[in-house]
Amino acid sequence: MLSVESWPEPAVRAWKLAHRFQKFLVVGAVGLAVNQGLLFLFHDIVHLRLGFASPLAIFLSMIVTFTLNERWTWHDRGTGPMLHRMGMYFPINLVGLLINFGILSLLVHEFGVHYLIANLFGAGVAAVWNFLVNHHVTWRE
């Protein structure tokens, strides 16, 4: 294992942030799998309109990602009751939901991109927003 004990403090902080972001990406991959699977299920199997299926799939994946992030990514951060962090996480990620759905809608309706591919792009952009804001607000030191 790499020892960062002799590194300057800014380098240590950057290293820790990169490590935490890696965990966030793993959690995000699980959340994306849940999102994509549910989106396919709701849209292609249950035949819900994309405008309902996508936000519902994103919201349900948010529940999964909150739980994993709380227990693994930021297990060592955050103060107060978990419900307080949950109360910050969901509004922040609702903005991510709007980013994701907005990009999905734009790519599908304006450029004819398949909805599951468009969802990947939307989720990628939303993930950056979600990480940065949750890191500094929900699970701040």
Image (spheres, helix red, strand yellow):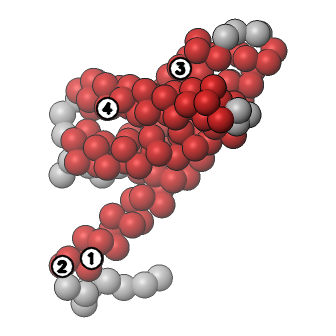
SS type, badge 3: helix
The residue pinned by badge 4 equals: 92
Instruction: Please say if the residues under marks 1 and 3 sit with CB atoms less than 8 Å apart.
Output: no
The residue pinned by badge 2 equals: 9
Q: Earlier in the sequence, mark 4 or mark 1?
A: 1
SS type, badge 1: helix
Q: How packed is label 4: few (under 14 Cα within 10 Å), some, or many (20 or more)?
A: some
**The disc label shown at residue 55, or none:** 3
On screen, residue 58 above or below 25: above
Instruction: Please say if the residues under marks 1 and 2 sit with CB atoms less than 8 Å apart.
Output: yes
Q: Quadrant of residue 129?
A: top left
Q: Can residue 80 be seen in this view?
A: yes
Alpha-carbon span between mark 2 and mark 3: 41 Å
Alpha-carbon span between mark 3 and mark 4: 15 Å
Q: Which of marks 1 and 3 is nearer the N terminus?
A: 1
**The disc label shown at residue 45, or none:** none
Q: How packed is label 3: few (under 14 Cα within 10 Å), some, or many (20 or more)?
A: some
Q: Residue at x 38, y 26 (%)?
A: 94
Relative to residue 111, is residue 16 drawn left or right?
left
Instruction: Please say if the residues under marks 2 and 3 sit with CB atoms less than 8 Å apart.
Output: no
Alpha-carbon span between mark 4 and mark 1: 27 Å
SS type, badge 2: helix
**The disc label shown at residue 12, or none:** 1
Alpha-carbon span between mark 2 and mark 4: 29 Å
Alpha-carbon span between mark 1 and mark 3: 38 Å
On screen, residue 123 above or below 105: below
Amino acid under disc 4 = Ile
Measuring from the top left, give residue 39's x and y in whole percent: 67, 24
Q: In which quarter of the image is residue 36?
A: top right
The label nearer to you, 2 versus 4, is 4
Q: In which quarter of the image is residue 6?
A: bottom left
